[in-house]
C-alpha cells in the first residue's frame, strides 16, 4: 500500500491516490466523511471551519461501494478557494491583481523562509506556505479512513485522543477503566477537546480561550492506541523494516509534531530494567502474552500482540496574531512576520491526524505480510496465522 496527496491550502482541490488496497473491501463516502468531520470539528480551530465542510468524492477504485483492487482516487473540494481564485489561478500569469496577498515576511517556526530559500520562491513565500499548510492533512485523514476500514475488517481498532493542551493535562490512570477502545472512544469523542474527562475538558477549553484572547497559540500531546494488532508485524532484520520506526516517522511527518514516544517512552529513561521490561507469560487460551506494556506493543521493531501505545508532541502553531520578529525577504529590513488566518491550537485535530497515520502504517504492514489482492483471502490468511501464533 502506498499513497500520495496533492493540493494547496487555498487551491481548488485536495486530492489523494491510494494504491494497494485489496479488492472486496466495502467502502463508502460516509466512512471517509465521518473522519473528515472529526478532524474539522475540534476545539480551538479557526474561522475556516465555518466557511467550509469537508466532504470526499470517490473518483476511482470503488464500484457499488466495494473496492476493485485498482488505485483509489479521493478528492476534497476547498470551498474557501472561492475567495482565492485570482490569487491561486494556475492558468494565468502573475500580475499586480492576481498576486495580491504576497507573503514577504516569513513566520518564525514555519516553512516559509527555508522553503523559499530551497525552491527560490523569493518573489512570494505564499508558494511555500500553501503546500506546507496543515490543510494537506485533510487527505491524510481521508487515506487513514480507508486504512481504518480495512483494519476494522480484521479486528484491529485504532483511536486517538488528547492528553494535554498547554498546562491542562488529563490523568491517564483513568485509561484502566476502559475494557475496549470503543468504550474509550465514546468518552473522548463526547468532549470538544477530545480528552479523557469533563474536568480536563473544561481546563483545556479555558487554556485555549485565554490563549486566543492573548493572540497566541498553544501546543500539547496526543496519544494513539491500537488493539487487535497481530504479532510480528514489522521486522528486526533491517533498520528500515522496524514498524515502530515507520510509525515514528509518520507521526513526526505530521505538521507541527516535534516528538514521539512508545509506551512509557521518555519516562523509561529514569527507570531500571526490572521496572521497564514486559515479563512474558503463557496460557492455553491466549498463548504468549506480556504482563505489562511499558514498551508500547513493540519489541525489536515488531508488534508483540499487546496494545500499541504511541504519543506525539505538537508544538504551538507558528502563525500568531501577535506577530513575532521577522525580516522582509526583499528589503532585508526588520518587520513583524506575516499573519495568515490560523487556529489557536491544532492539538484537538492532531489527535485525529495521528490516529490516521498510525492506521496507515498498520495497514501497510498488514498488506506487506499477507495477500493484498483480495479481502477474503487476506482474512483467511490472517486467521490461520493467528492460530499458528497461538500454538507456538
Image (spheres, rainbow, N blue to C red):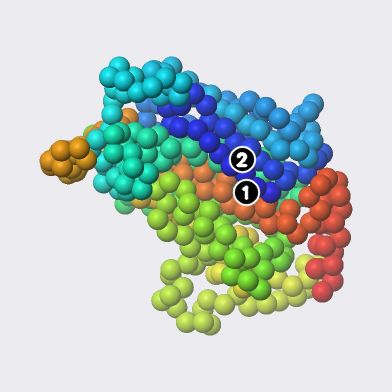
Q: Position of 307 compared to 260: left or right?
A: right
Give the residue at the far front of this rendering: 93
Residue at 57% from the left image edge and 59% from the top image edge: 246
The residue indicated by pointer 2 is: 143
Q: Distance between the residues labelled 1 and 2?
A: 7 Å
Q: Position of residue 348 (x, y in %)?
A: 44, 41
Q: Number of marks in the image?
A: 2
Q: Where is residue 279 in the image (x, y as percent from the top left)?
A: 63, 78
Residue at 41% from the left image edge and 41% from the top image edge: 132
Of residue 101 and residue 204, the one placed in the foreground of this image is 101
Can residue 269 be seen in the rendering of this structure? yes
Number of other residues with Cα within 10 Å of mark 1, as a class: few under 14, some 14 to 19, many 20 or more: many
Q: Position of residue 267 (x, y in %)?
A: 43, 70
Disc 1 and disc 2 in contact, CB within 8 angstroms: yes
Q: Position of residue 309 (x, y in %)?
A: 56, 59
> Dividing the picture into quarters, in which one does residue 203 lie?
top left
When the figure is inspected, residue 1 is found, relative to residue 131, above or below; the finding is: below
When the figure is inspected, residue 62 is found, relative to residue 120, above or below; the finding is: above
When the figure is inspected, residue 61 is found, relative to residue 116, above or below; the finding is: above
Residue at 31% from the left image edge and 47% from the top image edge: 117
The residue indicated by pointer 1 is: 360
> Dividing the picture into quarters, in which one does residue 82 lie?
top left
Residue at 42% from the left image edge and 52% from the top image edge: 257
Q: What element carries label 1?
A: helix
Can residue 214 be seen in the rendering of this structure? no
Amino acid at each position: 500500500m502506498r499513497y500520495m496527496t496533492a493540493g494547496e491550502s487555498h487551491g481548488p482541490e485536495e486530492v489523494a491516490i491510494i494504491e494497494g488496497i485489496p479488492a472486496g473491501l466495502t467502502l463508502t463516502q460516509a466512512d471517509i466523511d465521518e473522519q473528515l468531520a472529526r478532524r474539522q470539528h475540534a476545539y480551538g480551530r479557526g474561522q475556516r471551519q465555518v466557511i467550509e465542510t469537508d466532504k470526499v468524492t470517490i473518483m476511482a477504485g470503488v464500484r457499488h461501494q466495494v473496492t476493485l483492487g485498482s488505485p483509489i482516487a479521493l478528492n476534497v473540494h476547498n470551498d474557501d478557494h472561492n475567495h482565492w481564485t485570482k490569487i491561486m489561478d494556475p492558468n494565468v500569469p502573475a500580475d499586480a491583481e492576481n498576486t495580491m496577498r504576497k507573503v514577504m515576511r516569513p513566520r518564525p517556526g514555519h516553512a516559509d523562509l527555508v522553503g523559499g530559500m530551497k525552491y527560490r520562491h523569493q518573489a512570494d513565500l505564499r508558494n511555500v506556505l500553501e503546500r506546507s499548510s496543515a490543510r494537506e492533512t485533510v487527505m491524510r485523514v481521508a487515506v487513514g479512513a480507508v486504512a481504518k476500514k480495512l483494519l476494522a475488517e480484521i479486528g484491529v481498532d485504532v483511536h486517538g485522543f488528547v492528553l494535554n493542551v498547554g498546562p491542562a493535562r488529563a490523568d491517564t490512570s483513568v485509561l484502566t477503566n476502559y475494557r475496549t477502545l470503543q468504550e474509550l472512544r465514546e468518552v473522548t469523542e463526547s468532549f470538544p477537546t477530545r480528552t479523557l474527562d469533563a474536568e480536563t475538558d473544561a481546563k483545556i477549553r479555558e487554556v485555549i480561550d485565554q490563549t486566543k484572547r492573548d493572540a497566541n497559540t498553544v501546543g500539547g500531546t496526543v496519544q494513539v492506541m491500537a488493539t487487535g494488532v497481530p504479532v510480528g508485524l514489522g521486522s528486526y532484520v533491517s533498520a528500515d523494516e522496524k514498524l515502530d520506526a515507520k510509525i515514528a516517522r509518520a507521526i513526526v511527518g505530521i505538521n507541527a509534531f516535534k516528538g514521539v514516544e512508545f509506551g512509557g517512552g521518555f519516562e523509561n529513561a529514569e527507570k531500571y530494567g526490572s521496572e521497564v521490561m514486559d515479563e512474558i507469560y503463557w496460557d492455553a487460551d491466549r498463548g504468549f502474552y506480556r504482563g505489562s506494556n511499558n514498551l508500547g506493543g513493540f519489541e525489536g521493531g515488531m508488534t508483540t500482540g499487546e496494545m500499541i501505545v504511541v504519543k506525539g508532541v505538537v508544538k504551538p502553531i507558528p502563525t500568531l496574531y501577535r506577530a513575532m520578529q521577522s525580516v522582509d525577504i526583499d528589503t532585508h529590513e526588520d518587520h513583524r512576520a506575516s499573519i495568515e488566518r490560523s487556529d489557536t491550537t491544532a492539538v484537538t485535530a492532531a489527535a485525529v491526524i495521528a490516529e490516521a497515520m498510525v492506521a496507515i502504517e498498520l495497514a501497510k504492514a498488514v498488506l506487506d505480510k499477507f495477500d493484498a489482492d483480495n479481502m477474503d483471502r487476506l482474512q483467511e490468511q490472517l486467521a490461520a496465522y493467528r492460530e499458528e501464533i497461538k500454538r507456538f
